[in-house]
Amino acid sequence: MRTDVDGDGETDRVFVTDNNMAGWDSVETYLSVSLSSGEDALITYPDRWFSHVVTGDLSGNGAADIVLVRIAWGGMHDTGDVKVMHVETDETGKPEWVEYPRNFIQNPDLEPEWIGGWEDYPYPEDISIFAEEPIALDDDCYGAAIIEKDGKTMLRVVKMADAQTDSGMCIDCSYTPEGWYIEDIQMIYDYYGGDWGEKLLGAWNLEPDVI
């Protein structure tokens, strides 16, 4: 992917590679950036198979952020985790990957709603609990995207809400230094049973069976 990661107005190149050269039990994901200055930065993560990146300026500082989505392809529910990254300069002047906060900041005024046929399954009528319980960015994610909504650039993450029915929780959130403030939540019954991935994630609806 080509984007301006360090905000200098020049195009940089971002690469993501899943390396299983040592066998499926030792898969590693490599996220690297080659800056227009000629310098590089690399970070690695273990134990995921199917990875892709999403890019956009989530913090509003003029530099592109990188959202790394890693899906445990072959798992029971094809879920994974999401990490939001940016490039900073370390004390030696070299670029390095830095992760943004992984926590969601709860919004007590939210009123989540079920969409997509939930009435066929006996969910509790009061689903406000999904807006009140502590939830994190990392685990049980179906995918992520960067969207424009209500005049803001937001991170959209779809997390698994119920494994039995593959129901998802679509979270739209905006960046703060303390974490990701939840702007909206939609609950989707049977996420994989329709075209919800395409509707919610658009071009970032990258599923292992279609790539």
Image (tube, rainbow, N blue to C red):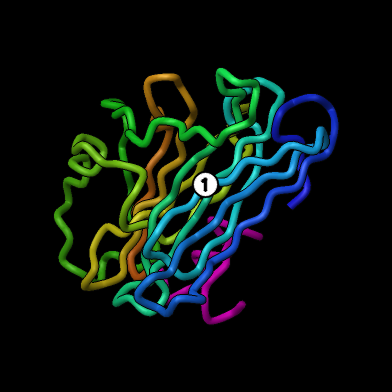
Residue in front for this viewpoint, 190 or 4: 4
**Which residue is found at the position 65% from the left and 21% from the top?**
93
Question: Quick check: 211 above or below 116?
Answer: below
Residue in front for this viewpoint, 75 or 20: 20
Residue 27: x and y in percent read: 43, 69
Residue 202 visible (yes or no): no
Indicate the quadrant where residue 177 lies: top left
How many numbered discs? 1
Left or right of 193 in this view: 130? left
Question: Quick check: 115 above or below 148?
Answer: below
Residue 114: x and y in percent read: 32, 55
Residue 93 visible (yes or no): yes
Question: Hey, what amino acid is under mark 1?
Answer: Ile
- Which residues fall within the magenta stretch? 191-211
Left or right of 171 in this view: 103? left
Residue in front for this viewpoint, 200 or 5: 5
> Which residue is labeled 1 in the image?
43
Q: Residues within 10 Å of mark 1 (few under 14, many from 20)?
A: few
**Which residue is found at the position 73% from the left and 52% from the top?**
1
Residue, far right: 10
Helix, strand or loop for the magenta stretch, by majority: helix
Q: Which secondary structure, mark 1? A: strand
Left or right of 148 in this view: 116? left
